[in-house]
Amino acid sequence: MASSFGHSFRITTYGESHGGAVGVIIDGCPPQVPLTEEDVQVDLDRRRPGQSDIVTPRKEEDTCQILSGTFNGITLGTPISIMVKNKDQRSGSYDEMRTKYRPSHADYTYDAKYGLRAWAGGGRASARETIGRVAAAAVAKKVLNYLAPNLEIVSYVKSIQDLVADVDSETVQFEDIESNIVRTGDPKMVEPMIERIKEVRSKGDSIGGVVECVVRGVPTGLGEPVFDKIDADLAKAMLSLPATKGFEIGSGFEGTKMSGSEHNDHFKMKDGSVRTLTNRSGGTQGGLTNGENLVFRVAFKPTATIMTEQPTVSTDKEDTELKGRGRHDACVLPRAVPIVEAMAALVLVDHALRQRGQNAPLLPDSLLPSIHDVL
């Protein structure tokens, strides 16, 4: 299974939803970075289940252990292993799924590919796999503090169904998002969104929405010009998350309704730097960051497991019906916010390390002008 992500900062997640543990191995973290379990735990607490009355009630502390790669709270430059034990599994809730495929879930496709599956909890297809990503991103953020000290990643719920938040991506702060359980940046939408989630959950159904992310203080030039464009890697990162169905950056699909003269981001000089008057490109041009804010959106579908009868097929290839069991989010959006931030951090730290490795000058500064003269 392709469970690894990144190049210079490479992570491999492991574990199943109802197995003994889940976690991550990080390869490529530079040495001498201060890192403790408390640094990681802060982000894991934002993603864990049971944190409010609008998310799954599964009671997991998600307490992490750093098993390798540090000494006295400092990274060694060797692989870092972080583990979180699963403690509140109720596999009996999934007995019926042993022989019936859950609609819009990974049950059938896993059977088709591998000939078997971990039916309890969804195995690797469970959102519990994202614990490893969030843990790795906590380490990535520590590295980014050195490579890009002004960089700031803020994600928030932009919409739930037809409820759309009015959020200024230029000014919204982390504290604004964490001040409410739905994690939106619009105070007027907090209660309507909470009420909508509770209403849908009471009917045994589920809903989806959109998470928007802004990254401020991005260094110019991150990304690779062809296959590993920064926006392409962000798209892959976000669409690798469970329940995602769409990605757009900058003007996104709305940009198709504009002409070139309307859409182009005109350049200007500001405080000695090249900037743009608008940011319809979403902070990238030619696959490279241009110094403006990265702004993108990720669409999440309604949770596949719902508590009402649905038509499906059994493992014996017979038509049947299935009603969801167990504990599930009626809307994944509030818990998706820190996961979107995590994947953004993993993409950015990987490209920042690649940039440092590729573009660090090989010659003293005194010789560089002669090189430019030749070119």
Image (spheres, helix red, strand yellow):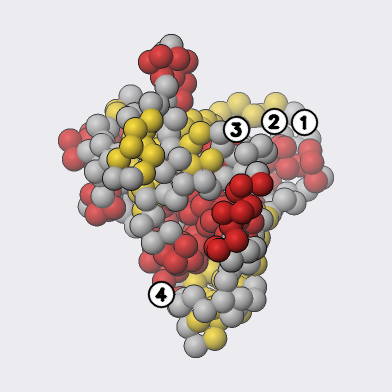
Which of the two residues, 16 or 183, is positioned nearer the viewer here? Answer: 183
Under mark 3, the amino acid is Ser
Mark 1 and mark 4: Cα distance apart in space: 48 Å
SS category of the residue bearing label 4: helix
Please indicate whether residue 363 sits to the left or right of residue 305 in the image.
Answer: right
Mark 1 or mark 4, whichever is nearer to me: 4
Please report the residue visible at 29 percent of the width from the left and 53 percent of the height from the top: 174
Would you say the residues marked 2 and 1 are in contact, meaning their CB atoms lie under 8 Å apart?
yes
Return the mark for residue 104: 3
Mark 3 and mark 4: Cα distance apart in space: 37 Å
Which residue of the protein is positioned furthest toward the right in this rendering?
115
Q: Which residue is mark 4?
A: 38
SS category of the residue bearing label 2: strand
Return the mark for residue 313: 2
Under mark 1, the amino acid is Lys
Please report the residue visible at 45 percent of the width from the left and 15 percent of the height from the top: 260
Which of the two residues, 164 or 273, is positioned nearer the viewer here? Answer: 273
Mark 2 and mark 1: Cα distance apart in space: 6 Å
Under mark 2, the amino acid is Val
Percent of width and height locating residue 7: 66, 56
Q: Which residue is mark 1?
A: 317
Mark 1 or mark 3, whichever is nearer to me: 3
Residue 218 is at least partly visible in this image: yes
Percent of width and height locating residue 308: 48, 32
Q: Residue 229's quadrant in the figure?
A: top right
Q: Above or below — where is 45 with respect to 200?
A: below
Mark 4 and mark 2: Cα distance apart in space: 45 Å
Reading the chain from its start, which is encountered first: label 1 or label 4? 4
SS category of the residue bearing label 3: loop
Percent of width and height locating residue 333: 40, 42
Please report the residue visible at 79 percent of the width from the left and 38 percent of the height from the top: 112
